[in-house]
């Protein structure tokens, strides 16, 4: 009986590590300059927070640089909305060392932390480095990648999704008048929109990964079959030559 219970607990523990959460973990702490930060307050104030955990080490610099450059790409279009937080992986590097490391590799930051309250283990498997993108909608995790899986375009795509103000498929967004239904869906997503140019639709999962791409020359209606995807929350992004808009939907299958 004890052996059976031990095996059962081991399985549960393994499953717990296998499935990372989809919402952020709140923290209140000071950065290396002594400024206090409460994550959920910042997200609720329309900020998008990109957190990069580093060792720090030379290989980390490349991928941390991707995250920093992605944040900078929004500095003009969304001033003050997107922040890059650099954190020591296990809070065992001094603030001065971490800040100096970032400066040496020209990695721009909005705040630097060496505090265990910013725990990368809250977001699944640890990484060297690890990057997450966090946004307002239910404090959602829009991106969660480790080491060489981190790309600048992936972080930028996740930031774009996080900046999207609409939270439901039943709402119109921008002059593209994107509308999709039903929400939740069990397989088919019916899409209505207005566009005189070819359109690309992308379905993006909560990690910022493009899991489905379809193109159409239709100008008002289109249907996408997402029944092959796993149950969960996704984002439907519509792009024309000049405009992009996104909506969130839930797949129940």
Image: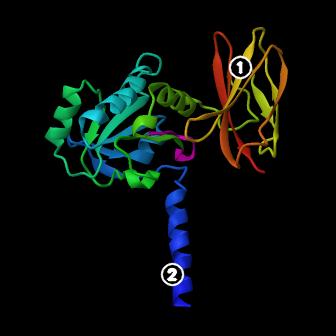
Q: Which residue is mark 1?
A: 200
What SS does tag 2 mark?
Answer: helix
Q: Check the image and report above or below for 153 versus 50.
A: above
Q: Quadrant of residue 64?
A: top left
Report the mark closest to the observer, 2 or 1: 2
State how far apart marks 2 and 1 are (Cα): 51 Å
Q: Is residue 26 magenta?
A: no
* Residues drawn in magenta: 132-140
Residue 38: give x, y in percent of width and height: 37, 47
Q: Residue 6 shows which numbered tag?
A: 2
Q: How is the image coloured?
A: rainbow
Determine the residue positioned at 54% across, 44% down.
140
Earlier-in-chain disc, 2 versus 1: 2
Residue 39: give x, y in percent of width and height: 40, 46
Give neighbour class at mark 2: few <14, some 14-19, many 20+ (Cα, 10 Å).
few
Residue 1: give x, y in percent of width and height: 56, 91
């Amino acid at each position: 009986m004890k052996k059976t219970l031990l095996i059962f607990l081991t399985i549960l523990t393994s499953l717990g590590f296998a499935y990372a959460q989809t919402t952020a973990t709140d923290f209140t702490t000071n950065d290396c300059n002594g400024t206090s930060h409460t994550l959920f307050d910042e997200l609720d104030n329309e900020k998008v927070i990109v957190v990069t955990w580093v060792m720090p080490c030379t290989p980390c610099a490349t991928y941390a640089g991707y995250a920093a450059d992605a944040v900078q790409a929004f500095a003009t279009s969304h001033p003050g909305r997107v922040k890059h937080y650099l954190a020591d992986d296990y809070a065992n590097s001094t603030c001065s060392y971490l800040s100096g490391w970032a400066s040496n590799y020209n990695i721009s930051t909005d705040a630097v932390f060496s505090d265990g309250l910013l725990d990368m283990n809250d977001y699944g498997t640890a990484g060297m480095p690890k990057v997450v993108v966090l946004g307002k909608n239910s404090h959602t995790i829009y991106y969660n990648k480790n080491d060489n899986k981190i790309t600048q375009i992936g972080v930028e795509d996740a930031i774009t999704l996080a900046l999207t103000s609409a939270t439901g498929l039943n709402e119109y967004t921008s002059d593209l008048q994107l509308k999709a239904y039903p929400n939740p869906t069990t397989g088919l997503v019916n899409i209505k929109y207005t566009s005189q140019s070819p359109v690309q639709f992308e379905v993006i999962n909560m990690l910022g990964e493009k899991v489905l791409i379809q193109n159409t020359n239709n100008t008002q209606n289109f249907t996408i079959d997402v029944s092959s995807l796993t149950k969960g929350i996704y984002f439907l992004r519509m792009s024309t030559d000049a405009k992009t808009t996104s909506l969130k939907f839930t797949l129940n299958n």
